[in-house]
Amino acid sequence: MADRRRVAITGIGAVTPIGITREALWNGLRARKSAVREVSRFDASIFKSRIAAEIDFEPTDFMETRRAKKLDRFGHFVLATTRLAIEDAELKLETEDRERVGSMMGTALGGVGYAEEQFLVFKNEGIRSVSATLATNVFGGAASCNVAIEFGVQGPNSTNAMSCASGTMGIGEGFRQIRDNYADVMLCGGAESPLNQLCFGAFAIIRAMSTRNDDPKHASRPFDRNRDGFVMGEGGAVLVLEEYERAKARGAHIYAEIVGYAFGNDAHHMTAPLPDGTQAARIMKNALRDAHVAPHEIGYVNAHGSSTPLNDPTETRAIRSVFGDHAAKLPVSSTKAYYGHALGASGAMEAAICALSLERGWLPPTLNFDQPGEGCDLDYIPGDGRDKNVEYILSNSFGFGGINAALVLKRAG
């Protein structure tokens, strides 16, 4: 422990369906309204699910037109969120040792949506009409590489593609780079742009998404008895992580501190969680152990809470296993009912929300939670949210392939 460096969150950049920028994200949470609506980006009429959480977004608000034309929507989200985070942190990269500044990102699908668009161009117009940037946009690693190139950061750099846990893992791996003295600053998070017809359809085919098309704003219902699947979203979030003492020395605003991280696998099924929740519980325990935090010290859990029939009771079971008697009075919520499930970006959005909740003393509600589903019997914070100052927060992310990841955040100070 004596050799482990502390890691502060000093910047937050967000592009989400409930708000673009840190403050707009927070205002969206306080408004307590879902952004889910009927899909407008493509024709969804052939699917049983026809709703999503879309973002009204103009890339040239965040980058030059020439740069925007070379990137796909996924790349636009990456650079926009990173620029917002750097500006929020008041980080002057021109004065930094660029080899000590890096980027770790996460995404489930990367540029697959752009590949889908370009395949249609190829099919209808021929190879000469396909974008010359297809190859450099389609791979998931474009996220952290574009950050490096755009902002000139030469430190540790990687993008993981671990499904819906990838944003959490991007932040967790960035945390480790600073903690273990491989970097001083990391630009970390996740981005996702899955709202293309076939990408969307792939999840509709396996009946993972809600079909509550007549009532979009109430379709995502984490832990509720009447939930029927997740609602797809898009967007991204990036955090500036910084060695704690240097952040204090330069007078940076510190939102929160990251103190623990763990990840692992169910080794069970590509789409279904291990029913007994033991591996999800193990990862939560490992994150707490990494943070040197006892279960009773956690004041809030930001749950993965995907609003699917299998995930929600399994996560509940895992939380009960980890927290024992403390689980009965432990506030829990899922914020996905606000902005849908943006796959690999969700964990990053939720880490940003946790940091702001620690700073501002308010825990967001689980929208649309009316009656607990079978096996869902925790304090899911309904209604207006809860004014409460807590010291530690646990944030969970679980994904396809059985991947589980968790972060522990601490109030600054």
Image (spheres, grey):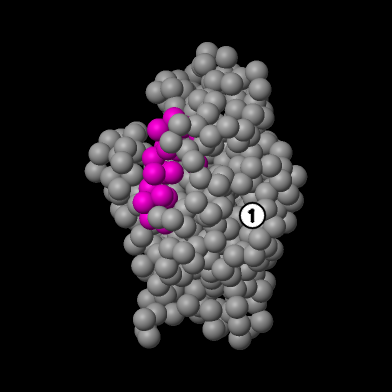
Spot occupied by residue 177 in the image (x, y as percentages of width and height): 40, 71
Tell whether position 307 is magenta.
yes
Q: Amino acid at mark 1?
A: Leu
Residue 45: which quarter of the image? top right
Q: Work out which quarter of the rendered image holds the N terminus and state it.
A: bottom left
The residue shown at (61%, 46%) is: 381
How many numbered badges does the structure rendering display?
1
55 shown above or below 300: above
Instruction: Report x, y in % for residue 153.
Output: 50, 68
Q: Is residue 293 above or below residue 380?
A: below
User: Is 74 above or below relative to 186?
Assistant: above
Quadrant showing the C terminus: bottom right
- At x 50%, y 32%, the residue is 373
Using a 10 Å C-alpha cutoff, classify the residue at mark 1 as few (fewer than 14 neighbours), some (14 to 19) or many (20 or more): many
Could you tell me residue 395's position as x and y percent? 49, 55
**Which residue is pictured at 68% across the width and 49% down the height?**
385
Q: Is residue 229 magenta?
A: no
Question: Dominant secondary structure of the magenta stretch?
Answer: helix
| x, y percent for residue 98 | 50, 75
Q: Nearer the viewer, residue 400 or 386?
A: 386
Regarding mark 1 in the picture, which secondary structure is present there? strand
Q: Which residue is mark 1?
A: 363
Q: Is residue 302 above or below residue 223?
A: below
Q: Which residues are magenta?
A: 305-323
Res. 375 visible in picture: yes
Asked if one can make out residue 99 in the rendered structure from this viewpoint, the answer is: no
Seen in the image, is 376 located left or right of residue 380?
Answer: left
